[in-house]
Image (cartoon, rainbow, N blue to C red):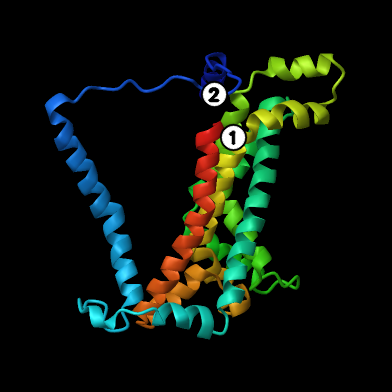
Amino acid sequence: MLVWVLRRRRQANTFAVVIGKGARAAAVPLRRWRPVAALFIVLLSLLSVVGPYLVVLWMSLNTRWFGNASLSGLSLANFDYVVRQYFAFWQISGNTLRIAAMEVTIVLLVGTAVSYFARRTRLPGRFLLQGTAMYTLLVPSVAFLTAVMWAWIGSPIGLYGGLTLIAMTQAARSLPIATRNIGDGFGQIDQSLEEAANICGAGRLRTLATVTLPLLRPVLLAAFTVVFLSALRDLNTPLFLGGGSTKAMTLSVLIFQFWSETRIGEAAALTIILLSVTLAIFLPLSRTFSRGY
């Protein structure tokens, strides 16, 4: 009863907008403390972001013990090995991208459908449907992956050890974030716009395709970015459900395998490659946000 009252109170105090909030944060003049603040930000960035990446880059270029500071051991031998000599590099890279593509497709379709039924319909049990999409937040990842593994390892369908099961499981773990963001996006769109389309003769599907989804595009793009990039770095899911085969191995698992074998240079080289792929995807998307959203 209390949950129902709080939900009704919250819905009564919500506001809908069309294209987003236009307010900007107010600038606070720092005066003589401006150099101190700038130095703090630079040092924080160096210690938390730039420094670790430089160390990984140094490790990837060093063919000797990675703690050796000698420049004579720097070369591209580690990159040459993992790209040209390692027999399954391109297959594993393709697996990583295919799993990410399947995961983001599942998450966007399911998350949009669940948010639509919860926000735009009066179907009984719609909030239970939304809660079902969020349930993986309550389960520790190791326990959830162990349950999935034992559920499918002896199944006659044969999904265990394949890319489909890995993508479905990763999608289940990413679904709560996407559902929450997409649901908030539906909440920011005033229903009077959809009602106007209905008055003009548009059906539910046409209204969704021509009014709701175009206004929801920034939220969907943001959810796509978060889910796709998180899928590239996921380690636990393919490690538990891949079956140890290169047919279902991803770059993160291969990095972990090299690291466990104390092949530090190869692991660091793969890390730089994965980081480059991530930046190649993220930078164009960030420019899209800065231009239109």
Res. 143 visible in picture? no
Q: Which residue is mark 2?
A: 20
Drawn side of residue 32 relative to residue 195, left or right: left
Give the class, few, some or many, for how many residues have Cα within 10 Å of label 2's Cα (few <14, many ≥20): few
Q: Residue at x 56, y 85 (%)?
A: 87
Identify the image quadrant of the N terminus: top right
Q: Residue at x 69, y 31 (%)?
A: 214
Secondary structure at badge 2 equals: loop
Drawn side of residue 133 relative to residue 272, left or right: right
Q: Residue at x 58, y 73 (%)?
A: 92
For residue 218, which numbered disc appears in the image? 1
Give the Cα distance between marks 1 and 2. Answer: 9 Å
Q: Nearer the viewer, residue 140 or 49?
A: 49
- Image spot of residue 2 (x, y percent): 51, 22
Contact (Cβ within 8 Å) of mark 1 with mark 2 = yes
Identify the image quadrant of the C terminus: top right
The kind of residue tagged 2 is Gly
Hey, which quadrant is residue 62 in on the image?
bottom left
